[in-house]
Image (spheres, rainbow, N blue to C red):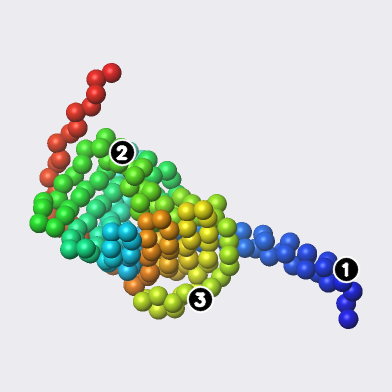
């Protein structure tokens, strides 16, 4: 029988080896969230304080600004008697959400409207905090690693890395667009229902330009 000191030493060594490995795995999973391909999509059952519904996240196009390629990230869904879509123009998921460069909104029964860039930028912080993909992408690298788990969702069983922080928890997988298999927090819960690489824009009409805001004089 091994001595208590030897057993304690072995356990300490195991912890010292597992901790860096877990951190490395988390970094790889977090990096996969930032990977963007036009056409990628993931759909979810969503529940929250305002009820439940269906939501889909997708990359539906690109736009060049100088030497930078920006991506149209679409959030579409239906629930609580209303449906619609919002598209935001972002440089990626690993940057500050205040970097939103454009926004198009389409609600049921109303024409699609493209917001002025200043308005889109002002709304960027709020949008990022309430959009799970952007919010989790921002928090991922600082979260506590719980470990790998098999998660059952309407989309099937997926092996995912369980992460936690003060604002909630998420189960992430590299082979799921945007990474999220399951997530829960102050804004509700998401459960994966499907995924793919053939997303098209839900907004088929040409957006109207929303009138600019009246900015206060200096």
Q: Nearer the viewer, mark 2 or mark 1?
A: 1
* Numbered label attached to residue 145: none
- Above/below status of 208 relative to 159: above
- Above/below status of 151 relative to 69: below
Distance Cα–Cα, label 2 vs label 1: 59 Å
Instruction: Check disc 3: other Cα within 10 Å, few if <14, some if 14-19, many if 20+.
Output: few
Residue placed under numbered mark 3 in the picture = 150
Residue placed under numbered mark 2 in the picture = 121
Residue depicted at x 21% and y 63%: 80
Q: Position of residue 96 (x, y in %)?
A: 42, 43
Name the quarter where the N terminus is drawn.
Answer: bottom right
* Numbered label attached to residue 5: 1
Q: Earlier in the sequence, mark 2 or mark 1?
A: 1
Q: Are marks 3 and 2 in contact (CB under 8 Å)?
A: no
In the depicted view, which residue is nearer to us: 62 or 185? 185
Residue depicted at x 35% and y 53%: 131
Q: Nearer the viewer, mark 1 or mark 3?
A: 1
Q: Quadrant of residue 67?
A: top left
Instruction: Check disc 1: other Cα within 10 Å, few if <14, some if 14-19, many if 20+.
Output: few
């Amino acid at each position: 029988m091994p001595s208590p000191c030897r057993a304690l030493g072995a356990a300490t060594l195991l912890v010292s080896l597992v901790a860096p490995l877990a951190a490395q795995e988390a970094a790889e999973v977090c990096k996969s969230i930032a990977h963007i391909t036009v056409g990628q999509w993931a759909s979810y059952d969503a529940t929250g304080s305002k009820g439940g519904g269906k939501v889909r996240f997708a990359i539906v196009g690109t736009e060049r600004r100088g030497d930078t390629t920006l991506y149209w990230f679409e959030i579409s869904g239906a629930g609580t008697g209303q449906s619609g879509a919002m598209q935001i123009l972002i440089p990626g998921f690993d940057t500050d959400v205040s970097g939103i460069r454009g926004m198009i909104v389409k609600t049921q029964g109303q024409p699609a409207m493209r917001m002025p860039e200043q308005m889109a930028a002002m709304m960027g912080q709020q949008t990022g905090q309430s959009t799970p993909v952007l919010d989790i992408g921002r928090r991922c690298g600082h979260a506590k690693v719980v470990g790998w788990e098999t998660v059952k969702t309407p989309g099937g069983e997926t092996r995912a890395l369980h992460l936690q922080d003060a604002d909630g928890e998420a189960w992430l997988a590299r082979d799921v667009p945007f990474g999220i298999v399951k997530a829960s927090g102050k804004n509700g819960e998401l459960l994966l229902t499907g995924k793919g690489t053939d997303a098209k824009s839900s907004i088929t009409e040409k957006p109207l330009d929303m009138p600019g805001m009246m900015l206060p004089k200096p």
